[in-house]
Amino acid sequence: MRNETRGTVELTLAMVLSGTLGVFVVESGASPFEVVFFRCLFGAVALGAYSLARGFFTGHGFTARKLGLAALGGVFIVFNWVFLFEAYEATSISLATVVYHTQPFFLVLLGAVFLRERISAGKLGWLALAFAGLVLVSGVGPGDTASLAGLGFALAAAVLYALATFVTKRITGVRPHLIALVQVLAGLPLLLPFVGFGGVSGLGTGWFWLLGLGLIHTGLMYVLMYAAYAKLPTAKIAVLAFTYPAVAMGVDWAVYGHHIGLVQALGVPLIVLASLKVTLAARTPAAAPAPRTAARGPEAASPAATRAA
């Protein structure tokens, strides 16, 4: 029980940190591509140093196939972050985060398409409920192009997250820290062409926010999550994962004064309940012991290990 209590504290702290990620992104003053690039850079330093100190590189378990899958997952992960951060700018942290939590449903659809997994009537019902919640949460009209764009970015991020999870589930026998390290390293050459170094050189205090995204929201947060996974049952992990959107919405209101309207608020519990039911029914690898896999998550392997961004 003491071990489970420690895991609960670790995962809760990780989800609280994830909930503050939006503020770090906005306050950095950098473009989404630049934010993700430096998150990958500083995150790689943090994860690499931790893995080296713990001796994870010895007997790492990678094969050419596993390394390729990890890199492919990295492609999906980094562009998932780009779209999510674009959604923050186009709409609000609260709305983007709630819509982003439609990830489990896209994972179910991917399983049906690529693995021919049967979607039960119960799952279809939860999918319908989540869609109803999404309609309510969006709260946008046809002429509200900015919010519609933000909604689209958040949905694209959710799809990419599901793809990253789908791919990473196929990697076994490798510590999740190392898979996450490969994923953020893969992001560096992918995003380098989109980084305007002339612009970021004048960020000033924005560098502290970018450094925090790498060291805190990628290094420390992942270490806490992976430590917690080995100690907690699936049900508790699934429930605690919703600390992330709750904190994100609270922080968005406290810092920027953003809050969702009454009609939008009615859709939040529908998405949360449906997502929780689908996650528990699927018994996703979020409950797997950390040394075995980084698959799900949050972002979602790395963020794909849970619904952390």
Image (cartoon, helix red, strand yellow):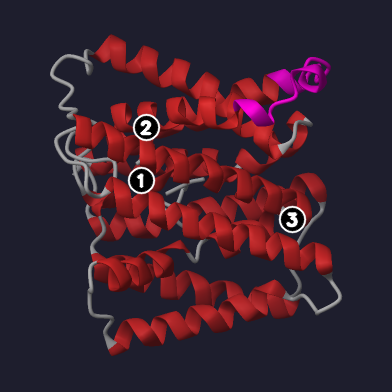
Secondary structure beneath label 2: helix
State how far apart marks 1 and 3 are (Cα).
Answer: 24 Å
Q: Is residue 97 above or below residue 288?
A: below
Location of mark 3 (residue): 92
The residue lying at 38 percent from left, 68 percent from top is 276
The reply, left or right, for residue 263 in relation to residue 172 is right
Q: Position of residue 230 (x, y in %)?
A: 21, 40
Q: Which residues are magenta?
A: 192-207
Q: Position of residue 209 (x, y in %)?
A: 68, 25
Mark 1 residue type: Ala
Q: Is residue 91 above or below residue 196?
A: below
Secondary structure beneath label 1: helix
149 vs 135, nearest the viewer = 149
For the image, the number of numbered tags is 3
Which callout, 2 or 3, points at the residue further toward the start of the chain? 3
215 vs 182, nearest the viewer = 182
The answer to the question of whether label 2 and label 1 lie on touching residues, with beta carbons closer than 8 A, is yes
Residue 287 appears anywhere in the view: yes
Location of mark 1 (residue): 305
Say which mark, if any, is on residue 180: 2
Mark 2 residue type: Ala
12 vs 144, nearest the viewer = 144
Q: Is residue 19 above or below residue 99?
A: above
